[in-house]
Amino acid sequence: MIAGTTSDAGKSVLTAGVCRWLHRRGVRVAPFKAQNMSNNSAVVVDAQGRGGEIGRAQALQAVACGLEPQVRFNPVLLKPGSDHTSQVVLLGQAVDHIDAANFRRLKTTMSGAAFTAYDELSAEYDVVVCEGAGSPAEINLRDHDYVNMGLARHGQMPTIVVGDIDRGGVFAAMFGTVALLDPEDQALVAGFVVNKFRGSRALLQPGLDMIESATGRTVYGVLPFDVDLWLDAEDALAYGRVLGRPGPARGSEWLRVAVVRLPHISNATDAEALACEPGVSVRLTVEPGELADADLVVLPGTKATVDDLRWLRETGLDQAVLAHARAGRPLLGICGGFQMLAEQITDEVESRRGEVPGLGLLPVRIAFAADKTLARPAGQALGADVRGYEIHHGRVAHRAPELQALITLPGGETEGAVAGNVFGTHWHGAFESDDFRRRFLTHAAGLAGRHGFAVAPDTSFAALREATVDRLGDLVEEHLDTDALWRLVEKGAPPGLPFLPPGAPALA
């Protein structure tokens, strides 16, 4: 089990790194996260062709293990649609919504599914590397926990706590995490990993020695801050964040891309493929001025299309989007962003607000269906092969007969829409198809008047993703005590680990 002192401490990347390290050793290893809370999800397809959703991080961890992703790697996925409710995705399928009123009832179902999935995986694989969620020291939630120490105790698995030193207070967070656990939970916490360190290791060493002395537990290593580890981000992306580290422009001009940072943004990782291209600057923003300066504006996916469209209007960003489109510059809507571009949205499923006017930039009408579309389709767009994945309730209920489609499927069906400089598609992940991405960016640059922009002919998104998990494996091998980690795999948590007071009350 890899737990963390906080959310975004580095659990996901450390889990992927440990998975890749074990995979390189010839170990049959699988990733697992009992419950994930994220709107960044991936679609997996089982042997029967049925689609299902899991957290994006578990899909990347599957790549690190050399495996095709499967729903058992993340049996419970909670997708927040508001501050109070989340959609419950159980073994890949949306089954309910959870809130304070039905929390306890659904917890029983979710924990049962999670424990069963873990037990199956642990019987099939040599090692299962489990990622925790948030912090294991959320003492108000411990009696129903099946994600952190509840899972660790179920599998009697040694647990490592990772802390983000870049935030400060990492030693206090590590000590406090252990000291708030009850004795049986503490007995499974074998030690710590420090994440995102920059500076002299010699200056840090006294602190490492003191935390080992104070807790009686090992620091398994210190991972350095690495600016290149940004692909497949799962947690909420910061306002105004520039994605990636784009290489120098291949032509005489850069292409500037502004992605609207919607409140319930989902699968913002779509923009990462654009940011992989040299000479393409991608920024997530909530500033109308940054849309005015952009060459290409992207309305990304969202878990709450109607609510986020209302927010777009309340903030005045809708006027910036409309002005950008009316100026003839390219505008792209993906999934929920595509739905916002429609003339009308009928939603009795997510927001239950009925008929709502869209931005009116594409002559289509959207209607929400109770069943979610989950698929991994393939087709042709702009003369290039393209693959993607679909996760949406909204469907195109009507489209103007003369409207051009963006994508053509093998059977002759069409998907998405193009109206001059305005593009829309329900497909996530389409820009991971290298040839399509290059053609789209070249076309968008022409519409924006960036005739000096040129794509690179050799950028491979799949290769960059593989390089990311390889880099994570390298970091584990270079900076962690892998011999000690292997002893945890073989023998479990060391016996006789000291109890740190005060500890939480023991569970009944």
Image: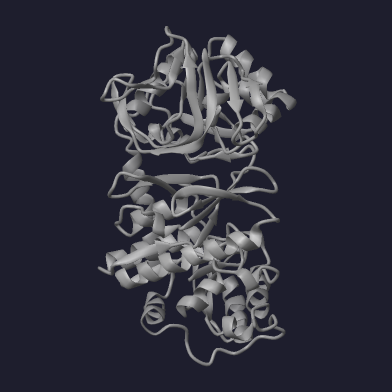
Image: 66 above or below 349: below
Query: Does residue 195 appear in the picture of this structure?
Result: no
Where 215 falls versus 95 (above or below)? Answer: below
Is there any visible trace of residue 87 in the rendered image? yes
**Residue 130 drawn at (x, y percent):** 45, 67
Q: Residue furthest bottom?
A: 496
Q: Nearer the viewer, residue 160 or 168?
A: 160
In percent of the image, x 33 and y 72: which residue is there?
123
Splitting the image into 4 quarters, where does residue 476 fall? bottom left
Q: Nearer the viewer, residue 190 or 472?
A: 190
| The C terminus sits in image quarter | bottom right
Residue located 67% across and 43% down the image: 82
Residue 224: give x, y in percent of width and height: 50, 61
Residue 493 vs 2, above or below: the answer is below
**Residue at (68, 77) in percent of width and height:** 180
Q: Residue at x 44, y 35 (%)?
A: 428
From the top left corner, tell me how far across and down residue 467 is, in percent: 35, 50
Q: Between 17 and 139, which is closer to the camera in this rendering?
A: 139
Left or right for 195, reference 138 = left
In the image, residue 126 above or below residue 199 = below
Give the tally of numbered discs: 0
